[in-house]
Amino acid sequence: MLVIIGSVVVLVSVLGGFMIAGGNPLVLLQWSEFIVILGAALGSMITMAPMKVHKGLIAQITGCLKGSRYNKTAYEDMFKALYEMFMLGRRNGMVALEPHIGEPSTSSILTKYTGFSGDPHAVELLTGALRPLIDGKVKPDQIGLLLDTEIDAMEHEHHQPIDVLSKTSDAMPGFGIVAAVLGIVITMGAINGPVSEIGHHVAAALVGTFLGILVSYGFLAPLASAMIFNGQAEIGYYRTLAKAISGFATGMAPMMALEVARRGLPGDVKPTSEELESMLKAVSK
C-alpha cells in the first residue's frame, strides 16, 4: 500500500507543479517517446535475465503492492506452531512428528496456524530440517549449517530480480536521452518549417529526457528499495525459524529455543518475553 501511496504522491507532485506553473499536462503525452523509452527498458530487462528471474520480479512487485506478510501476527503463529511441534517431539520422541512432517497440509498442528502454514517456504524449511533429524541422517548440531546454507541460497535468489530492476532503473535516464536525440533528429529534419512546428518537436524531445529521469528516480529505484525491505523481512522470518529449530535440535527446551529466536527480532514484530510466555502457556492449555 505504501508503494502505491508514494507513487501517487510523486505523480501528483510533478504534474501538479507543472500545471501550477502554467503547463498543459496533455503536452506530456508524447506516445512515441513512451514507446521508445519503455520498449527499450522492457527489451533490456528481457535480455539481461532468464525467465525464472522475471517471474520472481513479478512476484516481488506484487508482494510490494500488497505489503509484507511477515508482521507480528505471522511471528506469533510461527512460535505457536513450533512450540506445539517441539513439545510433541520432546514428550513422545521425534518419531511422533513424522505424520506432521510427512503430510504438513493435513497436520492437526500446522493447519491451526494459517499465518505459518500459509507460507510454503516456511513449511518446507521446517519439514526439510526435521525430516533428516527423524531419519537420523544428520546430527543435531549440523542442522544449523544446513538451514543457513538453504536460507543463503534463498536470499541470493531473492536479490536477482532486485538487481534486474535496479539496473533497468539506472538505464532509464539513458533511454530518455536516446528518445530525446531521436526527437532532435526529427526536429532538424523540420528546421525549415514553421516555428510552432519546431517548438513542438523540441518539446517532444525534452519529454523523453523528462520521462526517463522521472521513471528511474520516481518509480523504479524506490520500488527496488521497497523490494529489498520486503526481502529482508522475509529472510528475517526464515532465519528466526532456523534459530528456533536449531536450538531445539541441539537440546534446548522448547520455550528456551523460541526465546533465543525471539531475541533477534526487530522491535515492530518482537513480542516481549512476557507476551511469548503467556502465548505459549495458552497453547499448552
Image: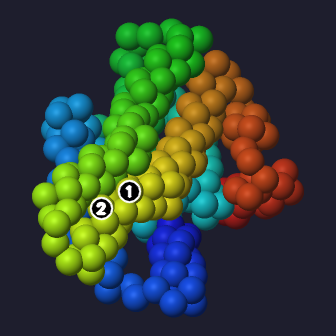
Give coordinates of residue 79: x percent, y percent: 62, 50
User: In the image, is residue 249 above or below residue 255?
Assistant: above
Quadrant of the drawing holding the C terminus: bottom right
Disc 2 vs disc 1: which is toward the camera?
A: 2
Spot the residue most to the right. Answer: 274
How busy is the neighbourhood of tag 1: few (under 14 within 10 Å), some, or many (20 plus)? many
Residue at (52% x, 75% y) in the render = 14
Residue type at numbered disc 1: Thr
* Secondary structure category for the residue under label 1: helix
Residue 20 in the image: above or below residue 127: below
Foreground pick, 98 / 5: 5
Task: Return the x and y of residue 193 as percentages of the image width and height.
Answer: 16, 72
Which x, y percent locates residue 235?
53, 39
Circle 2: element type: helix
Q: In this view, does 112 lie above or below 165?
A: below
List the residue tagged with mark 1: 209
Q: Which residue is drawn at 20% across and 47% down?
A: 40
